[in-house]
Image (tube, rainbow, N blue to C red):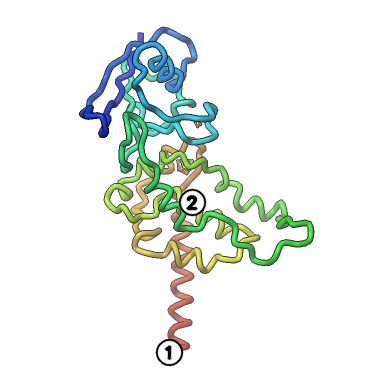
Amino acid sequence: MAYLKIFRYDPSGGVEPHFQRYELPPEKGMTILEALFWILENEDSSLAFRCSCREAVCGSCAVHINGEYRLACKTQVDPLGEEITVRPLTHLPILKDLVVDMKPFFDQYEKIKPYLIPREEPPESKEHYQSVKDRKKIDSLVDCILCGACYGSCPVAMGDPDYLGPHALLKALRFVQDSRDGAKTERLAMVATEHGVFRCHTIFNCQKVCPKDLDPTGAIAKLKMKSVGFKIKSMFGFARSAG
Ligand code: SF4
Ligand code: FES
């Protein structure tokens, strides 16, 4: 028999933060998301949680389950033991129960201009050609589903609300390394700040929790190296023009 111990809180409805315990029916292969739906449909229709695709693609169901940030739709109940604790993502305002306001997360994301700024006008076909070799350079960076697990697990994001965050920095590297992008210098200037790559303390939490097996810590380390090169170049450029 398994139980879910779920964080409940309704700031607008006067419900103080507390944990509520629900017994689950024995069902082989049940995921945490299915368990939340079972509770919603059979025990408590006031429970709030977020989901969409139910197949680890949209990123909307990320929560804290038994001490780790995971996707509820990708995590099975059985291996987690008898009592499973489910909490919302941290560092983000709670709207209700497991639903957080993702605005601060996406505000940081937007700062790094997460879209292609083309190096040149598209050819007549209206497609920016990229060779297989160049595509390989961003293979390990394109799969982010913006679930927020890395952000929730990052202690730096907790201490600095202006920190860009592992999700935004990983995406910044994705465009810096894209052969079709023409804003590499601008992007490195965006991330080479006290609230960017140099705020990261290389704690590896983001790498550990990413449900898509991406490596934001490694991406940040690469951006640090590229940013140092960029800073040195701009210092010499300044020295030359000043001299
Ligand atoms: S890098 Fe991984 S953990 Fe972070 S938002 Fe993207 S998919 Fe989620
Ligand atoms: S519901 Fe889309 S990732 Fe879980």
Q: Residue at x 45, y 74 (%)?
A: 232
Amino acid type for the residue under numbered disc 2: Leu
Dot 2 surroundings within 10 Å: few (below 14), some, or many (20 or more)?
many
Query: Which numbered circle lies on residue 170?
Result: 2
Circle 1 residue: 242
1 or 2: tag closer to the N-terminus? 2
> Residue 115 bears which disc, if any?
none
Is residue 153 left or right of 13 when viewed as pictured? right
Circle 1: is it few (<14), some (14-19), or many (20+) Cα within 10 Å? few
Residue at the location (45% across, 24% down)? 75
User: Relative to residue 151, is residue 163 depicted above or below?
Assistant: below
Q: Residue 5 at what x, y percent from top left? A: 30, 20
Q: Secondary structure at mark 1?
A: helix
Q: Is residue 82 visible?
A: no
- Establish if 100 lies above or below 183: above
Is there CB contact under 8 Å for labels 1 and 2?
A: no
Residue 107: image location, x then y, percent: 41, 52
